[in-house]
Image (cartoon, rainbow, N blue to C red):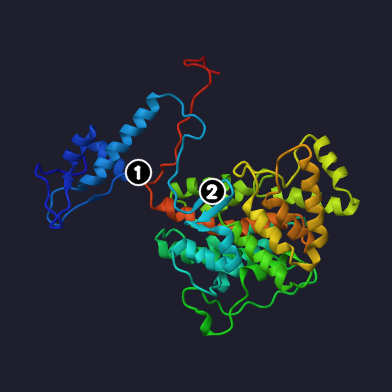
Amino acid sequence: MADTESDTEPETGRGERRLTTREAAELLGVKPETVYAYVSRGQLTSRRAPGARGSTFDADEVEALLRRGRREAAAQSQGPPAPGDTVVRTGITLIEPDRHYYRGVDATALARRYGYEEVAEWLWTGRLRPGVRFTAPPETRAAARRAVSALPAHSGPMDGLRVAAIAAAAADPLRFDLTERTVLASARSLIATLVDALPPAPGQRVPAADAPRSGEDAPPSAGPLPPSIAEQLWLRLSPHPADPASLRALQSALVLLIDHDLAASTLAVRVAASARAHPYAAVSAGLGAADGPLHGAASGLAHRMLAEVLDRGSAAAVVADQLRAGGGVPGLGHRLYPAHDPRAQALFALLAEVPGAADALAAAREVAVTAAQRTESHANVDLALAVLTVSAGMPPEAGETLFAVGRVAGWIAHALEEYAEHPLRMRPRGHYRGPKPPQPMP
């Protein structure tokens, strides 16, 4: 045993109840050695008072662990959990049948009024910083650019984002500091680095980056602001000059994509954060989960379909081909919205003001009307993103890139929530369905 414990309850002088190792073990119904095992796993914290003979434990924390253990034991006695039984406490996003809210504020209203960086800062800190911009140190940007430039020529923007996140982590010696202030500094730098590392679109010239100025120490009055994340993304995704209406639509798309409750990628982020992975690794987990046609890449399927509609001049023929292939129609329906996806409606309204988006917008409406003859599914945000990316001449992967960059802010918000929880709590119990032991040795 690591310590010799006294038999009296220690005094702290602050009205805090402290327990000796023996008392904590008796309360939990375990051996003293197990109490130290709880400490090593991060489930309990110990403290040695000056002059004391052994470690002491916060009585409230010990009692909370006891209650949690009883709940887990009760859950195990009821057999394997049913799908949807796991509940994660979060104060970030609420989804209703026709709306979604960030910390209680309508997300579509936020998207109309504020930029991506402003909403991200407010979501993280509760403070609105008008005109805030995200930048990164030169060495971080250089490391990410070198890593992305080494990728094969056929690599896409999402490959670049994943590699840039790893390079940014390697360049940050403070990445293992999980205090809120350091995590937020890393988040601002990471978002700026992800975008900066992407090569410019054909015909676009990316201006040399100014000396880095973070949103924390560079208010708008300090001089000319660096380009916004939306402006930088445009230069890397579209070969055409950006008009104000198109930039507004892109900016709003990023805000609307920041978070959507516990989507697959967000859950992956929270699992990583529960294991106390640093924020770069947590974001990398999200990027990995988003790399699939059923989540982040769904907008690419809608982009290709919409481009085909414009090329063939008929939504009916393209919808028929989609159904003949055995799949659904990309960009239609959402399991959380029985009627309209509010994000799609907000983006369609903004895209109606973009002069070059009229044809793509009409094609999207034709797809929705054609499909409505047989299904009640309405346009979702992927179809709206497809209108934006097709009309701007962006590649099919552009919608997935917008999704990933926008969602990083939400992933960081969820990681911060998870860092405040007990570690390693995201551990479901497997329901074993293999051969009953003992089995012969293979």
| Residue marked by disc 1 | 41
**In this view, 133 is above or below 17:** below
Q: Nearer the viewer, mark 2 or mark 1?
A: 2
Q: Is residue 160 visible?
A: no
**In this view, 317 is above or below 229:** above
Quadrant location of the N terminus? top left
Q: Is residue 82 left or right of residue 147?
A: left
Give x and y (percent) for residue 144: 62, 64
Q: Residue at x 76, y 57 (%)?
A: 387
Q: Is residue 79 visible?
A: yes
Three-letter code, disc 1: Arg
Q: Residue at x 64, y 58 (%)?
A: 161
Q: Residue at x 53, y 77 (%)?
A: 213
Label 2 SS: strand
Label 1 SS: loop
| Residue marked by disc 2 | 95
Which of the 4 image quadrants contains residue 370? top right
Give x and y (percent) for residue 347: 68, 59
Q: Residues within 10 Å of mark 1 (few under 14, many from 20)?
A: few
Q: CA distance from mark 2 to mark 1?
A: 34 Å
